[in-house]
Image: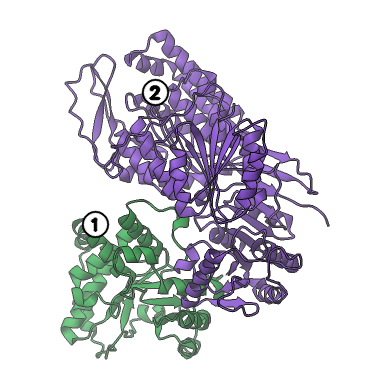
């Protein structure tokens, strides 16, 4: 069902078409839009005029012309269900922090830098045209990072420089002109960047001289920029192209994936195998093979890492404006006195447990990290009580170092797991389901000790096993071909794993929730770091005993301990790709605030309970959508 | 290196009088790592100091001017600018001690360092690295060519044949190994070497430098090495003229530790620039 009122915050660099591409899908699914546009450019006024002409449906598009600082004000209005922000990185970060705890969900589409990867098997002249399209035209969103294989470096530089000499800058509306001006701010940014690059020792080539006070900035090619210089880490502004050489395809991927941005890239190579290998290996939202900058409303456009994780266009763009049926409207749950600096910082000390009853003393569980049980760094345990007040067992007290170790172990398992065929993933999940079935009596008895009656306990175990099997069966390589009208050739919408997914499980339903969250995450190729239910982590640790023998090391890591402290560590960790949090409202607010660090997509419960036993909430399509990210791969054909 | 080791007459009786107790050395090696941990801002300071001792090295068969250039840029800017600013160390000229490459790549290294405006020395491995099993004539020629191309330091591979037949050479620095062996720089070996350096200094007044190389990958290890040199030889040896660490991936681990110290968070791979 549709989300409701959408707030759109658009930057001044957007063309009318791009604005329409964001507004129309929202209207198409039935949402209403309030667009906040900067006052400087005239394009939004056209938008406002259009909105005014919608007589029969007043109020479905509303346009406010104001500075970006009104963004948080717009977002905190009651009734705004989602805010989609398109613009610069730092503003997006600030907005993410400001909106933590508010009712509106935030979607970010940040940055405009693209990447062009030129291998030695490419048609260099066509690739040079690709560079022109990508960076030196009015359609290009931003600057370009160019990676050229060393063996074709000289050739490429020569052709680029020759092509640059034939570019014409002039007034944008003049048809014979290649690129216009984008305002004083953009020109100053480019000038500063190029000056700084020069001071770091880079070579700068600009075709033709442009007087200093002119509003036009000439097409610029920067090479020999040290990767360790601050310029190389910052976003490349329009119309600058920063070129660097690489030796092998593997090095190209390392260089390309070595920046925090991940919006779009193109790969130029006439060797199909190499082109696809690079295309699949790049961590970006859109990959064009032997072309650049193609767009179509049916193809989703988005990014990953610090380019934000919101999409527009295609099915993913529609999902942005929809939410699962039956979900209530989002309300603000802001807690004004939440101190972000101290939340979860110190671990409250737990009282020692009472005397143990029973024949044998309960040995403490360790943390399940890297495929085996290990002692926690702090070398202490916490007691777990059962529903009758007796001691149920001891679990490890995990801390920041344990989280770091768990995330590292998960990263080491990522490439192996993502490379597994869907059949292999299915087999592993089914093996775990079978193992849990064999363990049913132990699990049921532990659940009974937590106060669940025997019949319900058995039902819970059975449902968990069933869920594992269902998600296992759905672990197919999800890729679909999209219909794109103007293109000869397929466009693939690939669903790729996010990477390391951190999950903080709810206190209730210690077994069912754990399995319901674990299964979709694994089925889509992620590796996980989980913080199990604080009330009874023993059930999760029982499952770990089976996982220790069945799963590759590091695939699933379970860290027990103080939930707030572990949540803090995970939310602030820059190398966790996504975080699902099902805990308290304050924790949810902290997670949303802290995710601004590396802009990881988060899913929080806002303190509300979830009906895990119902199909819609416990095993619905929302879980599958959130467990993977999309990549659009364009393959224009022709020989 | 400011002064050269003038050398002395070879007196084999010095060597025959040396006694080394293996278990005791192992114990001391274990102690160094456990008893001198450095934390917080002192750890950050020691890590920055460790950076200034690194001979940033690339010795692979597929080295080209492209990656040597990248290495030299990293030598000039070893730690990200904003992290150094946060520690108020951005204007202290922190670079690595040297760049170490194969003789054929010395030209590229010199060119790249000049382009980026850095005056750190280019060190070259020479004399049939790593095995040393080539003719003396070609080995001397290699050194001569490398120096002609612009290398100011040479990592010489001693002829193990001569050593094993009792014929010794002298040097300004001693290095644990080429770094290409199965076992490279370990603490027990280093302790023995450092004690030998100290004895030589007490006997002759000549200071010989020390360079562990190979297998030093984590920032924690590098701190242990600094502690070791400080304990056995003293602060005078904690200078790039007398102490170097041959490493390549060590620098990224140090950068990650400094990132964690400054921001309190653990960095992702793409947060820090590649070398």
Q: Chain of mark 1?
A: B
Q: Residue B106: x, y in percent? A: 49, 82
Chain letter for green, please.
B
Quarter of the figure that contains the N terminus of chain A: top right
Mark 1 surroundings: few (<14), some (14-19) or many (≥20) residues within 10 A: few
The colour scheme is by chain
Q: Is residue B15 above or below residue A358?
A: below
Q: Quadrant of residue B2?
A: bottom left
Q: Chain of mark 2?
A: A
Q: Residue A338: x, y in percent? A: 30, 38
Residue A420 falls left or right of residue A366: right
Q: Is residue A405 visible?
A: no
Q: Residue A16: x, y in percent? A: 65, 50
Instruction: Name the residue that disc number 2 marks.
Output: A510
In this rendered view, identify the residue nearer to me: B102 or B259. B259
Q: Is residue A112 above or below residue A425?
A: below
Q: Which element carries disc 2, helix, strand or loop?
A: loop
In this rendered view, identify the residue nearer to me: A268 or A318. A318
Furthest residue toward right: A639
Q: Quadrant of residue A426?
A: top right
Q: Is residue A188 above or below residue A276?
A: below
The residue sitting at 24% across, 57% down in the picture is: B40
Q: Is residue A233 visible?
A: yes
Residue B222 falls left or right of residue A463: left
Residue A189 falls left or right of residue B46: right
Instruction: Name the residue that disc number 1 marks.
Output: B40
Q: Residue A354: x, y in percent? A: 17, 22
- Mark 1 → mark 2, Cα distance in angstroms: 38 Å
In this rendered view, identify the residue nearer to me: B29 or A58. A58
Q: Which element carries disc 1, helix, strand or loop?
A: helix
Which colour is chain A painted? purple
Quarter of the figure that contains the C terminus of chain A: bottom right
């Amino acid at each position: 069902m549709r989300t409701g009122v959408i707030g759109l915050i658009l930057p001044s660099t957007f063309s009318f078409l791009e604005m329409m591409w964001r507004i129309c899908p929202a209207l198409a699914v039935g949402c209403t839009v309030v667009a906040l546009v900067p006052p400087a450019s005239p394009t939004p006024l056209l938008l406002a005029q259009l909105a005014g002409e919608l007589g029969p449906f007043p109020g479905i598009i509303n346009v406010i012309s104001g500075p970006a600082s009104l963004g948080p004000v717009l977002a905190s209005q009651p009734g705004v269900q989602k805010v989609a922000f398109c613009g610069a990185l730092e503003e997006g970060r600030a907005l993410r922090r400001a909106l933590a705890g508010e009712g509106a969900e935030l979607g970010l589409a940040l940055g405009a830098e693209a990447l062009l990867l030129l291998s030695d098997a490419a048609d260099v002249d066509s690739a040079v045209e690709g560079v022109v399209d990508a960076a030196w035209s009015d359609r290009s969103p931003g600057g370009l990072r160019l990676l050229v294989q060393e063996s074709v470096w000289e050739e490429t530089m020569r052709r680029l420089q020759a092509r640059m000499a034939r570019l014409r800058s002039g007034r944008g509306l003049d048809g014979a002109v290649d690129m216009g001006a984008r305002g004083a701010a953009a020109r100053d940014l480019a000038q500063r960047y190029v000056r700084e690059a020069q001071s770091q020792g880079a070579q700068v080539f600009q075709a033709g001289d442009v007087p200093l006070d002119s509003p036009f900035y000439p097409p610029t090619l920067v090479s020999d920029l040290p990767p360790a210089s601050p310029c190389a880490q910052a976003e490349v502004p329009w119309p600058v192209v920063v070129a660097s050489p690489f030796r092998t395809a593997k090095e190209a991927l390392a260089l390309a994936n070595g920046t925090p941005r991940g919006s779009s890239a193109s790969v130029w190579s006439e060797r199909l195998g190499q082109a696809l290998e690079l295309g699949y290996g790049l961590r970006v939202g859109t990959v064009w093979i032997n072309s650049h900058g193609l767009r179509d409303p049916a193809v989703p456009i988005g990014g990953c890492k610090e380019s934000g994780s919101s999409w527009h266009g295609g099915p993913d763009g529609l999902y942005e404006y929809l939410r699962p049926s039956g979900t209530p409207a989002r309300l603000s749950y802001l807690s004004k006195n939440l101190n972000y600096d101290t939340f979860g910082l110190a671990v409250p000390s737990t009282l020692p447990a009472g005397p143990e009853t029973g024949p044998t003393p309960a040995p403490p569980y360790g943390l399940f990290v890297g495929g085996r049980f290990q002692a926690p760094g702090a070398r202490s345990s916490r007691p777990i009580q059962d529903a009758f007040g007796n001691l149920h067992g001891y679990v490890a007290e995990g801390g920041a170092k344990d989280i770091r170790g768990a995330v590292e172990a998960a990263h080491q398992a990522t490439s192996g797991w993502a490379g597994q065929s869907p059949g292999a993933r299915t087999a592993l999940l089914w093996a775990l389901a079978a193992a849990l079935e064999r363990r049913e009596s132990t699990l049921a008895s532990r659940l009974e000790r937590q106060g669940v009656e025997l019949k319900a306990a058995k039902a819970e175990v059975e449902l968990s096993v069933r869920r594992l099997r269902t998600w296992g069966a759905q672990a197919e390589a999800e890729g679909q071909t999209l219909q794109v009208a103007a293109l000869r050739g397929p466009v693939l919408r690939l669903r790729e794993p996010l990477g390391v997914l951190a999950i903080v499980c709810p206190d209730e339903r210690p077994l069912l929730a754990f399995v319901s969250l674990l299964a979709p995450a694994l089925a889509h190729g992620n590796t996980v770091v989980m913080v199990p239910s604080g009330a009874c982590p023993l059930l999760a640790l029982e499952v770990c005993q089976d996982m220790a023998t069945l799963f590759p090391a590091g695939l699933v890591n379970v860290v027990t301990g103080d939930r707030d402290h572990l949540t803090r560590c995970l939310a602030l960790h820059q190398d966790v790709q996504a975080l699902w949090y099902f805990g308290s409202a304050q924790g949810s607010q902290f997670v949303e605030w802290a995710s601004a660090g590396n802009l990881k997509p988060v899913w929080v419960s806002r303190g509300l309970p979830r009906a895990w036993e119902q199909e819609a909430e416990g095993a619905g399509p929302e879980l599958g959508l959130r467990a993977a990210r999309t990549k659009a791969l364009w393959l224009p054909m022709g020989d | 290196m400011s002064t050269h080791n003038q050398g002395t007459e070879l007196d084999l009786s010095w060597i025959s009088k040396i006694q080394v107790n293996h278990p005791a050395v192992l114990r001391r090696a274990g102690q160094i790592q456990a008893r001198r941990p450095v934390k917080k801002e002192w750890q950050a300071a020691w890590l920055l100091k460790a950076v200034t001792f690194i001979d940033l090295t690339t010795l692979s068969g597929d080295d080209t001017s492209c990656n040597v250039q990248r290495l030299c840029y990293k030598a000039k800017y070893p730690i990200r600018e904003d992290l150094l600013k946060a520690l108020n160390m951005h204007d202290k000229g922190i670079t690595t001690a040297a760049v170490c490459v194969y003789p054929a790549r010395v030209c590229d290294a010199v060119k790249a360092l000049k382009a980026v405006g850095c005056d750190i020395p280019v060190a070259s491995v020479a004399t049939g690295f790593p095995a040393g099993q080539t003719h003396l004539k070609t080995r001397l020629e290699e050194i001569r060519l490398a120096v002609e191309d612009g290398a100011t330091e040479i990592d010489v591979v001693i002829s193990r044949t001569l050593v094993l037949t009792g014929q010794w050479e002298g040097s300004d620095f001693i290095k644990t190994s080429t770094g290409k062996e199965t076992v490279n720089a370990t603490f027990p070996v280093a302790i023995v070497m450092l004690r030998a350096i100290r004895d030589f200094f007490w006997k002759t007044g000549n200071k010989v430098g020390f360079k562990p190389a190979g297998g030093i990958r984590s920032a924690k290890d590098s701190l242990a090495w600094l502690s070791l040199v400080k304990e056995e030889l003293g602060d005078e040896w904690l200078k790039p003229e007398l102490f170097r660490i041959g490493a390549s991936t060590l620098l990224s681990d140090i950068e990650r530790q400094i990132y964690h110290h400054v921001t309190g968070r653990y960095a992702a791979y793409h947060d820090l620039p590649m070398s």
